[in-house]
Amino acid sequence: MKESNILEREVLDVIGENYHLIFSAERKVADVILRDPQKAVDFNVSNLAKESGVSDATVVRLCHHLGYAGYYQFRIALARDLGRKQYEDSPRMDKHDEIDQLFHEYAENIRNIGKGLDIQTMAACVYLLRSCKRVHILAVGNTCHLAEYTGFRLGRLGIRSTFHTAAEYFMNHVNLAEEGDILLAISQSGTSKQVLKGVELGKEKGLKVIAVTAYEGSPIAELADYVLYSAGKEENFNYYKRYAHLNEVAVLDGLLSFVMNHELIESRQADRPEMILSESKV
């Protein structure tokens, strides 16, 4: 089936029509998805493989046999289908109630993230950032702006960092990293291939790795020395919220708040750029 057509189809219909054509191991994965699509869409590839009793490769092969480019595309398509149904079935509220409810959920979610973060892990991350020579920040796609934001904030705190929107650049930075440098990997899914390769290269060079991710047991979380989880209250994977990163921003802001060290800022004159630029502001 051509990809241009497959993306226009309902995922569950595609599975049903091709069920008799896929291998027995792949049917185990299909059964898990068909039995509870809403639960299945919350899994990353490793979680789904574990739930199905098969390997990660089997999950990816199923997606390819059905006509999808990979598990990511398959998952996004399934989330889209479920998201449409949720939207159609959801009751309509008064506009003011919608706004109030939305921000109430945001606040509750951030509080849950804070409760879930391990204090010793946070303390270790703060120590690494304060004492390192340089922080190499890894992020790709719609997470790149978080790398830029974090790098800017670290600079204002007197901590040197590197970051770039292109993976080729941050791979160069990691490859040239020196003793005393550390990595900060940001990936909501914990499965981004380019970030994962950067982490693997950093580990080969003996660098300590801090990861910010929403998924426990994800490849990046497994490789990192310290993981700050950005998952708040348990909620279903949502196609329409997939590109929101409020959770990751909350974790990074919390980390940076604890990192603030006035002695370091003064010794490196980290606040000097702001004083210079203040002349251009009204």
Image (spheres, helix red, strand yellow):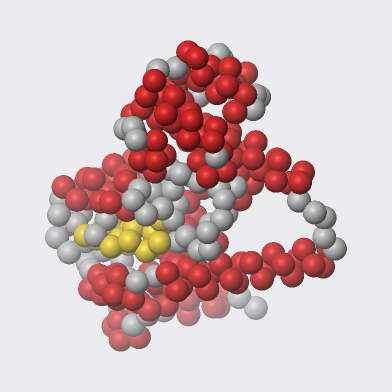
Question: Is residue 3 in view?
Answer: yes
Q: Position of residue 144 (x, y in %)?
A: 46, 51
Q: Position of residue 40 (x, y in %)?
A: 50, 41
Q: Which residue is rendered at x = 50% and y = 24% of the image?
A: 68
Q: Position of residue 37 (x, y in %)?
A: 56, 38
> As drawn, is 158 to the left or to the right of 44?
left
Front residue of 7/245: it is 7
Query: Quadrant where the C terminus lies?
Result: bottom right
Front residue of 278/225: it is 225
Height in image: 73 above or below 138? above
> As drawn, is 51 to the left or to the right of 235?
left
Residue 258 picture quarter: bottom left
Height in image: 14 above or below 114? above
Q: Which residue is rendered at x = 55% and y = 13% of the image?
A: 1
Front residue of 236/201: it is 236
> As drawn, is 216 to the left or to the right of 111?
left
Residue 57 picture quarter: top left
Q: Which residue is rendered at x = 50% and y = 70% of the image?
A: 112
Q: Which residue is rendered at x = 34% and y = 58% of the image?
A: 211
Question: Is residue 187 in view?
Answer: no
- Counting labels gives 0
Height in image: 24 above or below 167? above
Q: Position of residue 137 (x, y in %)?
A: 35, 56
Q: Residue furthest right?
A: 94
